[in-house]
Image (spheres, rainbow, N blue to C red):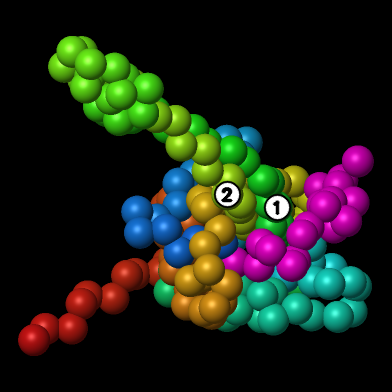
Amino acid sequence: MSVKNFRYLLTACVVFSSAVLLYGCTTGPKTFGNANPNLDFTQYKTYNYQRVLDTDREPGVRSIVTTYLINATDREMQARGYKKADNPDLEIQFSIYTKEKISSRSSPGTSTGGYYGYRGRGGYGGSVAYSETQITQYTEGTLNIDLVDNAKDQLAWEGVAIGKVRDEARENLEGAANKVVAEIFQKFPYTAPGFVTPEPASK
């Protein structure tokens, strides 16, 4: 099965109501990048987006999240010298997934109340050690950005961000998209052939 067809089949797994963009975590999401060692990145000069994106609500209906992801990715790709083209060297695909998770944390403490406090008044003067367990339920979100070799229909590079979905991100989708896409592309070490990174402006 081709990469494109495989990604299209995953569309039904996207949960838009809660995932939409992901990360308001103060420490930022965990990010990863993986490149296909069998492909030559020096041949890639142009990019565009696959006709059907997993982050759209349905084929032909662009979601707000997709728009923000495209805008953020355009900035990252063009900052590395890649140009948008109708028949690109690289096609880009987005996918968002969510999962409900539960975490537990135990913390030690002491008590002189309750049963043992009552006995203390009758001559038992010690405190009692205990362990308190806190259970927290949260939503974990994953954003994938895939760069696909258009001619070979092979995955060239994938960037992944994983983090907790927070209300701050839902309330500021554009800011969350800009932040997480920039963090993912920190794992992307390539530039278009012949591109020279501009020197920072002097103060």
Indicate left or right for 121 with 83 as reference: left
Q: Left or right? Give the position of 108 relative to 50.
A: left
**Magenta-drawn stretch contains 16:** yes
Residue 15 position, x and y percent, is 77, 60
Relative side of 47 to 119, left or right = right
Q: Distance between the residues labelled 2 and 1?
A: 14 Å
Residue 65 vs residue 105, the one in the foreground: 105
- Does 113 sit above or below residue 138? above
Counting from the top left corner in percent of width and height, residue 139 is at 61, 51
For residue 46, say whether it is visible: no
The furthest residue to the bottom: 203
Judge whether 175 appears above or below 6 on screen.
Answer: below
User: Which residue position holds label 1?
Assistant: 97
Nearest to viewer (mark 2 / mark 1): 2
Q: Looking at the rendered structure, which numbered label has been put on residue 138?
A: 2
Quadrant including the N terminus: top right
Magenta-tinted stretch? 1-21
Circles 2 and 1 in contact, beta carbons < 8 Å: no
Mark 2 and mark 1 lie on one chain; the one further toward the N terminus is 1
**Quarter of the image with the C terminus in it:** bottom left
The residue depicted at 49 percent of the width and 33 percent of the height is 104
For badge 1, the amino acid type reads: Tyr
Kindly state the secondary structure of the residue where label 1 is placed: strand
Residue nearer the viewer, 100 or 191: 100
Q: Which residue lies furthest to the left in this view?
A: 203
**What residue is at 75 percent from the left and 78 percent from the top?**
63
